[in-house]
Image (tube, rainbow, N blue to C red):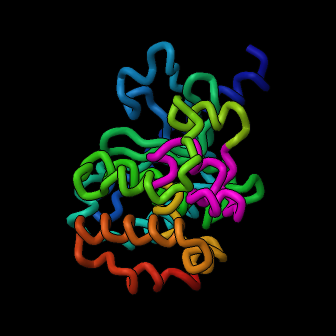
Amino acid sequence: MNKTILAAILIMVSLKPAAQAADTTVRSVHIGFSYLLAIFPQSWVQPPINAYAEDITPEEVPRSKTIISKGLGKYPETTLKNLLAVYFLRQIKFYGVAYGGTNSNNTIYLVNEGALKGYTDKYLEQTFHHEFSSILFRNFPSLLDTNQWKNANRPDFIYNDPENGVGAIRNNQSSQDLDTSFCLKGVLTQYGGSSVENDINTFAQNLFRPDENFWDYVERFPRIGEKTRLLMQFYKRIHPLFTEKYFRNFEHQ
């Protein structure tokens, strides 16, 4: 066998145990850094979803641990019982579409290709809160009135993605930048306009790791203010720690 090929194979083999050895537990949540089919629900690895992922690079493991420790630290222990594991991966694809993050019943999957490629500390922590809010919304559906939520939108506004975000990503309509034109409609971002769940996710990530102008927009745009209050009530019903004062503490991170 060619020596160069043999060396490459040995490196690839050696990386898997190293990544697995880096796995840890933070506040009773398993934090994983290597890809095995078993980390995904079985239905995800079958057509049409065809889940695909790659191991995170070893140099990104320490930063990922720091970020997830900070993110998990913003929730009380009882709330974290809804979360079993968080996996950091270099790439994830579903339906042939690259994702930055997703979630299953009790697990979160986050992509981290390094800060130079846009996977900054802020982006990764926001994505964690974004995905965790989906798990909490599914587990506590009666605590947030989605009719009230939709009524806060401008009357002519319609969520535009029947695929619940997949189409928005595929069609390059998934910007997470706060946008005043969307705020007038009642949603914070382009991606938030794709579905109710993605709308909720976008507000959640800004409650726990706010963009610079988020609280200004809460004051400036009545529809944004109404949804923010609804979501804070949702979290407070889950645990009394989650008051407006608590969320405001994250304003100047």
Q: How many marks?
A: 0
Residue name at image x 48 percent, y 13 percent: 47
Residue at figure coordinates x 49%, y 40% from the top left: 34
Residue 238 in the image: state x and y as whole percent. Answer: 24, 65
Taking the magenta stretch, the answer to whether it contains residue 105 is: no
Q: Residue at x 70, y 23 (%)?
A: 6
Place of residue 246 in the rendered image (x, y in percent of width and height, measured from the top left): 38, 82
Residue 11, horizontal then vertical, whole percent: 64, 35
Give whichever of 58, 202 is nearer the camera.
202
Please tell me whether residue 176 belongs to the stretch shown in magenta: yes
In the image shown, does 150 or 22 lie closer to the viewer?
150
Q: Is residue 51 above or below residue 161?
A: above
Q: Quadrant of the C terminus?
A: bottom right
Is any atom of residue 18 visible in this view?
A: no
Q: Is residue 145 visible?
A: yes
Relative placement, left or right, of 126 versus 27 is right
Q: Which residues are magenta?
A: 174-200
Q: Is residue 240 above or below residue 102?
A: below
| Quarter occupied by the N terminus | top right
Location of residue 38 in the rendering, given as x and y in whole percent from the top left corner: 37, 29
Say which of 132 and 18 sits in front: 132
Q: Is residue 8 left or right of residue 133?
A: right
Dividing the picture into quarters, in which one does residue 52 lie? Answer: top right
Q: Residue furthest front?
A: 155
Q: Residue at x 58, y 63 (%)?
A: 63
